[in-house]
Image (spheres, rainbow, N blue to C red):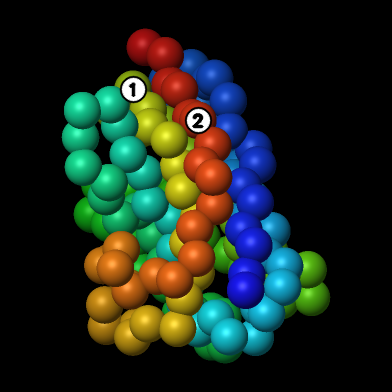
Amino acid sequence: QVQLVESGGGLVQAGGSLRLSCAASGRTLSMYIMGWFRQAPGKKREFVAGIKWSSASTYYADSVKGRFTISRDNAKNTVHLQMSSLRPEDTAVYYCAGGVGYWMAVTVDSQYDYWGQGTQVTVSS
């Protein structure tokens, strides 16, 4: 089993920045990809960014490309999501996910085996 714990959410003004972290514990070697998803009230959960544990290859949703950066710290089994130039439409609960799925399906939430509890990000206008 793998446990994922997010931190770093909060309230920020539009144009500001936040850094989310996801600490993984347990059988972390079983994971191949890590991703961040978000879900706003009344909306479906959507992919934000993904990263390969091994090569640090990354992939972003068009809506966050150029504003968000995903990174990983192998020594600490932690994945970060640096969010800049935040907009009110970025307001959502952000979830960290990990799994052994295929990189080509990094945007598909069913590819992920483990999920964190979520952390709220609120961007005020």
Does residue 59 appear left or right of residue 77 in this picture? Answer: left
- Seen from the viewer's position, the closer of residues 34 and 72 is 34
Q: Residue furthest top?
A: 125
- In percent of the image, x 65 and y 42: which residue is there? 7
Quarter of the rendering occupied by the N terminus: bottom right
Mark 2: few/some/many CA within 10 Å (<14, 14-19, 20+): some
Q: Tag on residue 61?
A: none
Quarter residue 87 falls in:
top left
User: Vertical placement of 49 versus 88: above or below?
Assistant: below
Q: Label 2 belongs to which residue?
A: 120
Does residue 22 appear left or right of residue 13 in this picture? Answer: right
Residue 98 at x, y percent in the picture: 50, 69
Residue 29 at x, y percent in the picture: 65, 86
- Seen from the viewer's position, the closer of residues 86 and 50 is 50
Residue 27 at x, y percent in the picture: 67, 79
Going by the numbered disc 2, the residue's amino acid type is Gln
- In percent of the image, x 30 and y 63: which residue is there? 109
Q: Label 1 belongs to which residue?
A: 88
- In percent of the image, x 65 and y 51: which residue is there? 5
User: Vertical placement of 82 versus 29: above or below?
Assistant: above
Going by the numbered disc 1, the residue's amino acid type is Pro
Q: Does residue 41 appear in this view?
A: yes
User: Vertical placement of 5 versus 90: above or below?
Assistant: below
- Marks 1 and 2: CB-CB under 8 Å? no
- In percent of the image, x 64 and y 62: which residue is there? 3
Mark 1 secondary-structure assignment: helix
Does residue 121 appear left or right of residue 101 in this picture? Answer: right
Mark 1: few/some/many CA within 10 Å (<14, 14-19, 20+): some
Cα gap from disc 1 to disc 2, whole angstroms: 13 Å
